[in-house]
Image (cartoon, helix red, strand yellow):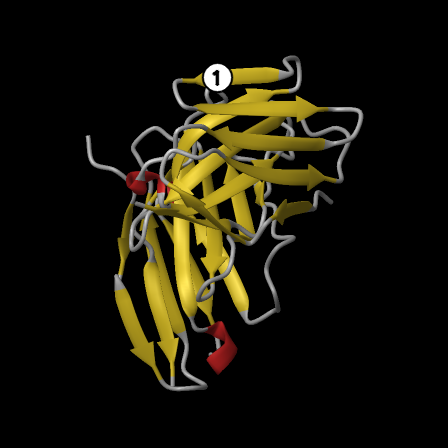
C-alpha cells in the first residue's frame, strides 16, 4: 500500500555532471508523469508515460533531459551535463488506468541543487 | 498544446472570508479540470475536480465552476480557515485519450490570516 516513492530525496551536484532521479509508482498504475517545480513556481510538465504507448516527451526542456520507464513500472529521469538552471524539485506522479477520478498521486519529490 | 493561465498568483484573505481563484485554458477539447492543493513542504494533493459535462460541483466549503464557452474555470473557498493556507494549482487535460497529460497553471499562494 506504499505511495509513489522517489529517490534520492536530495541531490547536490556540480555543474556539468550527470544525474539520475528514480521514481517507483504505485503498483498497478499505468500512467506516470514527471514534473519540475522551481522555487516558488508552478508544476512544469516534462514527460508522460501511459501503458505501452510511446511517451509524450513534449515538455522536456532540452536534449540533456531524457526519461525511460522499464517494464511499465519504475522510471528514471536523467539530466546530462547539469546546469544551474536545472536546480528544482522534480516530482513524479502516477495514476491508475483511466478511472472516474483521474487523480494523480505525487511522490515527495527529488530536490536537485546544481552548484 | 494546452496552456493554462491562473490568477491571482497570491491571495490574502481574512479568516472567514471567501477566496476565488480563476483559470483559463486554451484547448477546447480539454474535458477534465482538477484542482490540487500543496501545503508547504508537502506533495500536491487533489482536492476537487470537474468534468466538462457539468457546470458546477461542490464539496463542503469548496466549489468549482466551469464555463466551457469562455474556457475558464474557478475555485471558490468559503469560510476560509488558516489551514486553507497553501498553494493551489488548477489543471486541464483531455481524459480518456492518448493525450491525457495534465497541464497545470502557475499556482496561487493563498494566505488566510487569523
Q: Which residue is mark 1?
A: B58
Mark 1 nearby-residue class (10 Å; few <14, some 14–19, many ≥20):
some
Q: Residue furthest top?
A: B53
Q: Residue at x 61, y 55 (%)?
A: A59
Residue A96 x/y as whole percent: 41, 27
B2 sits to left or right of B108: right
A115 sits to left or right of B91: left
Q: Quadrant of the C terminus of chain A?
A: bottom left
Residue B9 visible in the picture: yes
Q: Residue furthest right?
A: B69
Q: Residue at x 36, y 70 (%)?
A: A112
- Residues A31 and A45: in front is A45
B12 sits to left or right of A108: right
Q: Residue at x 62, y 33 (%)?
A: B93
Q: Kindly identify which chain the residue marked by label 1 belongs to.
A: B
Q: Residue at x 64, y 31 (%)?
A: B73
Q: Quadrant of the N terminus of chain A?
A: top left
Residue B113 x/y as whole percent: 35, 48
Residue B34 x/y as whole percent: 52, 31
Q: Is residue B62 above or below residue A31?
A: above
Q: Is residue A3 above or below residue A74?
A: above
- Residues A85 and A59: in front is A85
- Residues B105 and B110: in front is B110
Residue A102 visible in the picture: no
- Residues B20 and A112: in front is B20
Q: Secondary structure at mark 1?
A: strand
Q: Please give the count of numbered marks on the rendered protein.
A: 1
Q: Is residue B101 above or below residue A23?
A: above
Q: Is residue A109 above or below residue B82?
A: below
Residue B50 x/y as whole percent: 56, 22
Amino acid at each position: 500500500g506504499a505511495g509513489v516513492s522517489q529517490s534520492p530525496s536530495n541531490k547536490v551536484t556540480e555543474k556539468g555532471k550527470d544525474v539520475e532521479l528514480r521514481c517507483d509508482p504505485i503498483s498497478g498504475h499505468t500512467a506516470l508523469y514527471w514534473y519540475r517545480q522551481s522555487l516558488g513556481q508552478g508544476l512544469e510538465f516534462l514527460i508522460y508515460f501511459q501503458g505501452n504507448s510511446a511517451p509524450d516527451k513534449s515538455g522536456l526542456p532540452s536534449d540533456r533531459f531524457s526519461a525511460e520507464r522499464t517494464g511499465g513500472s519504475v522510471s528514471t529521469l536523467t539530466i546530462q551535463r547539469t546546469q544551474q538552471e536545472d536546480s528544482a524539485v522534480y516530482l513524479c506522479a502516477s495514476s491508475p488506468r483511466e478511472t472516474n477520478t483521474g487523480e494523480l498521486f505525487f511522490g515527495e519529490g527529488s530536490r536537485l541543487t546544481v552548484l | 498544446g494546452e496552456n493554462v493561465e491562473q490568477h491571482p498568483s497570491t491571495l490574502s484573505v481574512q479568516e472567514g472570508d471567501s477566496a476565488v481563484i480563476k483559470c483559463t485554458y486554451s484547448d477546447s477539447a480539454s474535458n477534465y479540470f482538477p484542482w490540487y492543493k500543496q501545503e508547504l513542504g508537502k506533495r500536491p494533493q487533489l482536492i476537487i475536480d470537474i468534468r466538462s459535462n457539468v457546470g458546477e460541483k461542490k464539496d463542503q466549503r469548496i466549489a468549482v465552476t466551469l464555463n466551457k464557452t469562455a474556457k475558464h474555470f474557478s475555485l471558490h473557498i468559503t469560510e476560509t480557515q488558516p489551514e486553507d493556507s497553501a498553494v493551489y494549482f488548477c489543471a486541464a487535460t483531455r481524459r480518456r485519450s492518448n493525450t491525457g497529460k495534465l497541464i497545470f497553471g502557475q499556482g496561487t499562494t493563498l494566505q488566510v490570516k487569523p
